[in-house]
Every structure is written in C-alpha cells, then in structure tokens.
Image (cartoon, helix red, strand yellow):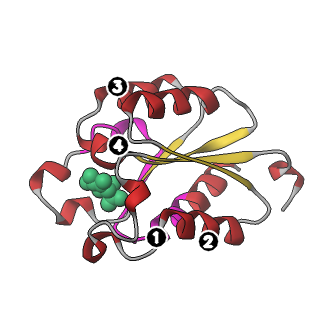
Amino acid sequence: SGDALMGRYVQIINGPNLQLLGRREPAIYGTATLDDIIGSVRERFGSIEIRHMQSNCEGAIIDALHGCGFDSDCMGVVLNAGAYTHTSLAIADAIAAIERPVVEVHLSNIFAREEIRHRSLIAANCAGSISGFGAESYALALQALIDYDR
Ligand code: DQA
C-alpha cells in the first residue's frame, strides 16, 4: 500500500477454455470459477489495481500483451496461456518483445500431466513460472510480481 504501488496495476490474462473454470474438468482444475479467482485476488491484493481479460483467441492475447507491455504503470502480467503455452511461438515472441515482466501460471502441475504439457514455449521468456497450486497459483504469481517489481 506504499507510494510505489500508487496508480500501478497488474494485468491478468487468461487464455483459451479458462472462462469455463468451475465446470471444466473440476478434478484437474478445481471448482472455483474465473470470477471467484479474480475476485479473491482483488480482495487479497486490495492496494493494487488488477485488470483482467480472458480470450480464447491467440491474437487477442498477443494484443493484450502489447497493450500493457510498454506501459510503465503496468507492474507486469500474470499469464495463464492455457494450451497455447505448449504451442504458441507467437505468444512467446510477444512476451520477449514487451518490456514488462510476465509470470507464467497454471492451475495444474503441467509437469505431472501428459508429456505434451511438459514443454512450455513461453517459460524461457517469462520472469518465472508457477504451476500446480490450483487457484492459489494466481495469488502466488501476483505476490511474485509485486516482490520482483521492488
Ligand atoms: C493450464 C494447463 C494447460 O496445459 C491447459 O491446456 C490449460 C490450463 C492450467 O492452468 O493448468 O488450459 O494452463
């Protein structure tokens, strides 16, 4: 809640299929909805503005990265790229192109799942990655970004 945080925000970006959280494979992704998750981090990080967008479209995710990634008021991005994590060189390139740090997040532990999910094309361009803590992954990513910013 210090001056360093005044007027600054974190951009959360959720990729494909994540608007279905709560009813999408709850045994893997939990029962919290995306609104529950965003609401809970907004409550916990009350002093920081949290902007959120979700899209199923690769290009819209890239546009969102460009939109905040050169903004000095943006502390950084918390990105769950969904399956694009494993396929999108274009999103990896967008993360490399922008100036603000990106933290990769996953609800599930991608390394404990199918082999194809073990590889992240975006990880090397991110400040770091958090995977496997369910809805809590977002709060951990936010805290990491805030600490990293200092
Ligand atoms: C995910 C993991 C990805 O492998 C998957 O395609 C998703 C969600 C996660 O949050 O655990 O859509 O990013």
Q: CA distance from mark 3 to mark 4?
A: 13 Å
Q: Give neighbour class at mark 1: few <14, some 14-19, many 20+ (Cα, 10 Å).
A: many
Q: Give neighbour class at mark 2: few <14, some 14-19, many 20+ (Cα, 10 Å).
A: some
Residue 148 falls inside the magenta stretch: no
Which disc is residue 123 wearing?
Answer: 4
Return the residue at label 1: 135
Callout 1 amino acid: Ala
The segment highlighted magenta reads: 120-141
Q: Nearer the viewer, residue 5 or 64?
A: 64
Return the residue at label 2: 40
Q: Earlier in the sequence, mark 4 or mark 2?
A: 2
Q: CA distance from mark 3 to mark 2?
A: 30 Å
Q: Secondary structure under badge 3?
A: helix
Ligand 1 - quadrant of the structure image: bottom left
Callout 2 amino acid: Ser
Residue at the spot 36% in from the left edge and 46% down from the top edge: 16
Indicate which label's residue lies in the foreground, 3 or 2: 2
Residue at the spot 19% in from the left edge and 52% down from the top edge: 117
Q: Secondary structure under badge 2?
A: helix
Q: CA distance from mark 4 to mark 1?
A: 19 Å
Asked whether mark 4 lies closer than 8 Å to ligand 1, one says no
In the image, is 71 to the left or to the right of 97?
right
Q: Name the quadrant containing residue 30.
A: bottom left
